[in-house]
Amino acid sequence: MYEELRNELKKRKYRITAQREMILKIFLESRGRHLGVEEVYRELLNRNVRISKATVYRSVELLVELGFLRKLNFGEGLYRYELADRSNRESHQHVICQKCGRIVEINSEQVNKIISDISKKTGYVIKWHDLKFYGICPECQAKEKEEEKRSK
Ligand SMILES: [Zn+2]
Ligand SMILES: [Zn+2]
């Protein structure tokens, strides 16, 4: 993956910086999570990497442009990022809690079937899709019930 990143950066005449590699490393180590720029920035500080938030933002955007990361919008007023399906990582869908913002990944067989149907009907090779489900997570449901009980 790092080798790939170095090649890709070189090809486009971008500088290969330790920070860019470190940012990719953070995403590789937190597979399945969906990090915002703020979280990546804090993670870098934890690892004693001195970097400005603006540089983090630019680096993350560059990794999106190069196809290493995918940019996601869950309607929270900020963008989140995850590792892209470069090595054909299985496609997945997101379920988002409207109360606490927790994001769960699912890989629905029915959705995969819909995709292959679409592919058959249109002749397109479907590269990726963006499907989100919004609701209330089990923890927040339990909390809501607790609060209801208390207010009675
Ligand atoms: Zn929740
Ligand atoms: Zn995801």
Image (cartoon, grey):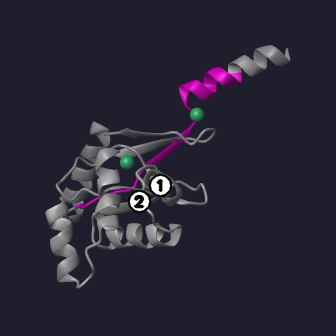
Which residue lies at the image location 27% right of the left edge and 79% below the top edge?
Answer: 15
Q: Residues within 10 Å of mark 2 (few under 14, many from 20)?
A: some
- In the rendered view, does 66 fall on the left or right side of 141? left
Question: Vertically, is 134 above or below 62?
Answer: above
Q: What residue did someone put label 1 on?
A: 45
Residue 55 in percent (x, y) is at: 45, 72
**Hey, which quadrant is residue 119 in on the image?**
bottom left
**Hey, which quadrant is residue 138 in on the image?**
top right
Number of the label disc, if any, that sits on residue 84: none
In the displayed orientation, state which residue is furthest to the bottom: 13
Q: Are marks 2 and 1 in contact (CB under 8 Å)?
A: yes
In the image, residue 132 lies in the stretch drawn in magenta:
yes
Q: Considering the image in quadrants, where does the C terminus appear?
A: top right
Q: Residues within 10 Å of mark 1 (few under 14, many from 20)?
A: few
Give 68 or 10, whichever is nearer the viewer.
10
Residue 151 in percent (x, y) is at: 84, 18
Give 98 or 121, whichever is nearer the viewer.
98
Which residue lies at the image location 56% right of the left edge and 38% below the top edge?
Answer: 135
- In the rendered view, does 131 fall on the left or right side of 16? right
Real-space Cα distance between discs 2 and 1? 5 Å
Residue 79 in percent (x, y) is at: 51, 61
| Amino acid found under the numbered disc labelled 2 | Val
Q: State the extent of the magenta-drawn residues as a range.
A: 126-144
Q: Is mark 2 within 8 Å of ligand 2?
A: no
Number of the label disc, if any, that sits on residue 49: 2
Which residue lies at the image location 34% right of the left edge and 52% below the top edge?
Answer: 26
